[in-house]
Image (cartoon, rainbow, N blue to C red):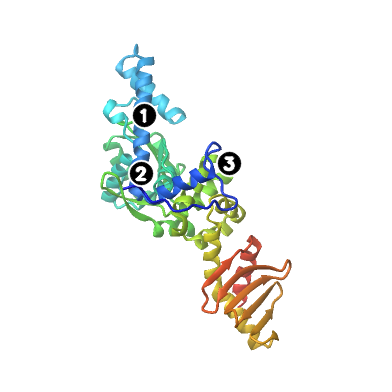
Amino acid sequence: MATQVPSLKVPIGYCPQADDTNSETDLLCFYLLNQRTATERLSMAAAMTRNARQLSLHCLSRQFAYLSAKAFARKLAEAWLQEDCPPDYIPTGSEMTWIQDSTELAAQLHCIFATLEVPYYVTGGVAAIAYGEPRTTRDLDVVISVPPSTLMRLVSVLEAAGFYLPGVADVPTELMRTLQVTQLDTISRADLVLADDTEYERLKFQRRRLMSWPDGTEVYLIAPEDVVVSKLRWRLHSQSEKQWRDVLGVLKTQQEQLDYEYMHHWAVAFDLSRVLEQVTLEAGVRAIADQQWATATYPTINRAFQLAQERNRTTQPRSNLNIAEGNRYRLIKDSSAQTLAVVAKADDREIARYDLQGAVVDARPFLQDRQQWRAIAQQV
């Protein structure tokens, strides 16, 4: 049976993932990705990675046919790991193991972490793939929460399981915040990042999700909202377009399944508000984010109107129409139309409209409206 595709309207400000892709095609691709499960998206990406590795292996084996097996294994490691290739690392696997991908590595690490009761979550590119657009990824990024007293035990278990860990002498001194591990058999590497002791990091562990992996293993994954916030934070320092594309992919795929108010809360904390506004516009989800803002803000708006009535600060220019004048906003309750509207006084712009039961009819706030109603909420 052919897939039924709904009529897709291109939102204002929408940007495709690539310059040579038109907006209609991009919308269709992400509509179809939205119909897939996270496991299916990971499987698509894993197949891409295996095919890319297989093609690379074939080309390099022809180019360097004169090398010994050991020398070729080293050449392969240098080509695939590039600047992250340890100076004395020789892969011990074979063509069968060398084409494995990051999802298989994550499943193996999960078993080790579970045995040692080490809390963790997978983040970075693999998480972006699970929630968004399938692509190849070279490394696996994992955040772990492990006290210094048991860190060396984890190192010993990893080494016994066939992982190469350079620089482990620095671990006890806490000079090293990231364990760079390379699996000897598969030429697969992972960054194990030691979690910071911050409110946001603790919250990310609370919000992590147990996700079914392609091989049936269940692996902890960072929540999709935290993928967006974390990648936008990384992009502040790197200006990486890959981070931006990953964020767009997550937003375009997840759509209304995301908690935009949560992301806006942490965007304020990390000075990302304008960036988040821009990326939601380019992803075509600004209307969803605005709807969630209006829903979350309605209790404050309704309370502000009630306070104005109690303090006799409302006017009634005609029957069934009551207006509360604030410093920056005008609240207009129209009993005949059964609506409550919020208007910015500076430019006479309606930023939200509700029915009298509090359901959102329309919402178009600017960033300053979000900021100002956050301040009003603290007062009322």
Q: What element carries label 1?
A: helix
Residue topped by disc 2: 42
Label 3 near label 1: C-beta < 8 Å?
A: no
Residue topped by disc 1: 53
Residue 181: % across, % down? 37, 37
Mark earlier in primary sequence (1, 2) = 2
The quadrant where residue 180 appears: top left
Horizontal side, residue 44 vs residue 347: left or right: left
Mark earlier in primary sequence (2, 3) = 2
Residue 216: % across, % down? 25, 47
For the C terminus, the quadrant is: bottom right
* Residue at 42%, 29% in the rendered image: 81
Of 64 and 48, the residue lying toward us: 48
Q: Is mark 3 on a helix, strand or loop?
A: loop
Kind of residue at badge 2: Leu
Disc 3 packing (10 Å; few <14; some 14–19; many ≥20): few
Residue topped by disc 3: 239
Disc 1 packing (10 Å; few <14; some 14–19; many ≥20): some
